[in-house]
Amino acid sequence: MASGGNFIESRMQRHMRACMVCSVVRTAQEFTRSGCPNCDFLQLAGNPDAVAEATSPDFEGLITISDTERSWVARYQRLQGCLPGVYAMQVMGVLAEEYIEAAEAAGVHYVPRDGSATEAVDA
């Protein structure tokens, strides 16, 4: 990713993974090196097995959000409070129960990002 984390080069797209909790998109190496910027409770940094279990290479659509508090897209995607960056619109995969429990323990209400569950968005 380029500086600022808001751009994905075409040649890098096939190496990208999306967090199954917040849908941020990074390479597996970036997740392993520094974890998920929004989901510290997943403890991905330095743990390639956790990266493989809590992120997915199977996602659809890319959106870049610079202000997650004011953007209606961020609100629709449930990204308020997340850092600016590149996010997937949908992330396919099943998150293991241990990660769902870690999210809930951290105060994060987990909703699958594959479109199988919907949640009303506050206007």
Image (spheres, helix red, strand yellow):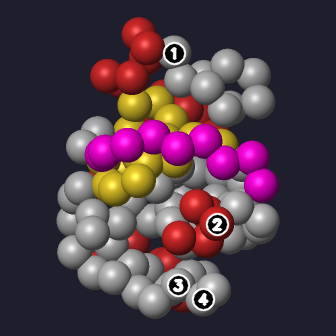
Counting from the top left corner in percent of width and height, residue 24 is at 52, 49
Q: Which span of residues is magenta-colored?
A: 59-67
Q: Which residue is mark 4?
A: 122
Exactly how many numbered labels are in the figure? Answer: 4
For numbered disc 4, what is the local secondary structure? loop
Residue at image x 61%, y 26%? Answer: 7
In the shown orientation, is residue 96 left or right of residue 30?
left
Q: Residue at x 51, y 15 (%)?
A: 9
Lower position in the chain sequence, tag 2 or tag 1: 1
User: According to the image, label 2 marks what residue?
Assistant: 72
Q: Is residue 26 above or below residue 99?
A: above
What residue is disc 1 on?
9
**Residue at the spot x=60%, y=88% of the render?**
122
Q: Are marks 4 and 3 in contact (CB under 8 Å)?
A: yes
Circle 1 — which element? loop
On screen, residue 84 versus residue 20, left or right, reads: right
- Helix, strand or loop under label 3: loop
Specify whether residue 100 is painted magenta: no
Q: Earlier in the sequence, mark 1 or mark 3?
A: 1
Circle 1 crowding by C-alpha within 10 Å: few under 14, some 14–19, many from 20: few
Spatial CA distance of label 4 from label 1 is 34 Å
Image coordinates for residue 8, horizontal then vertical, percent: 54, 23
* Residue 51 in sight here: no
**Residue 9 in view in this figure:** yes
Residue 112 % position (x, y):
33, 73
Q: Determine whether the residue tagged by mark 2 lies in a helix, strand or loop.
A: helix
Looking at the picture, which amino acid does disc 4 mark? Asp
The residue at which mark 3 appears reads as 121
